[in-house]
Image (cartoon, helix red, strand yellow):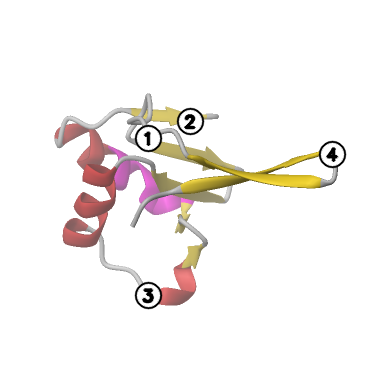
Amino acid sequence: MNAFNIIKRGNDFDVEAAAPKSEPEYDFDVRLDGFNALVTPLSDSAKEWMEEHVESESYQWFGPALYVKSRYIGDLIDGILAADFTVRGNG
């Protein structure tokens, strides 16, 4: 299936082919708030790694991000880095 954008120009709409998706700069985004973390796999290979290596329940997912209690985030990040992924975070 081809991706496309619908663009409004005045009272008219145009359809254009969407630009191909580029690989993200980082594989994972990690947002910490002191007690919890949201871990978002950004690249396709990061998503595959999460599916294969992280056990989770559906209620732990907030859109594309996995909710992780802070006491577990260190082990998860260690695993991510050991698999040679890159991480961007706020903490």
Q: Secondary structure at mark 4?
A: loop
Q: Is residue 59 left or right of residue 79?
A: right
Rendered image: mark on residue 20: 1
**Disc assigned to residue 57:** 3
Q: Which residues are magenta?
A: 70-77
Instruction: Measure the alpha-carbon separation of dots 4 and 3.
Output: 46 Å
Q: Can you say whether 55 is above or below 67 in the image?
A: below
**Residue 82: x, y in percent?**
16, 34
Indicate the amino acid at tag 2.
Answer: Gly
**Main SS category, magenta section:** helix
Mark 4 surroundings: few (<14), some (14-19) or many (≥20) residues within 10 A:
few
Instruction: Please tell me which residue lies in front, 56 or 3.
Output: 3
Residue 39, relative to residue 66: is it above or below?
A: above
- Give the Cα distance between marks 3 and 1: 32 Å
Q: Which residue is mark 4?
A: 10
Asked if the residue at tag 1 contacts the one at tag 2, i.e. Cβ–Cβ closer than 8 Å, the answer is no
State whether residue 25 is above or below residue 45.
Answer: above
Residue pointed to by mark 2: 89
Depth check, mark 4 against mark 3: the one in front is: 4
Q: Position of residue 72 (x, y in %)?
A: 37, 52
Is mark 1 in CB contact (under 8 Å) with mark 4?
no
Residue at the far bottom in the pictured view: 58
Amino acid on which disc 4 is placed: Gly
Residue lying at 84% horizontally and 39% vertically, measured from the top left? 10
Nearer the N terminus, badge 3 or badge 2?
A: 3
Q: Work out whether mark 4 precedes mark 3 in sequence or the reverse, and give the earlier one.
A: 4
Q: Locate residue 88 relative to residue 56 in the image: left or right.
A: right
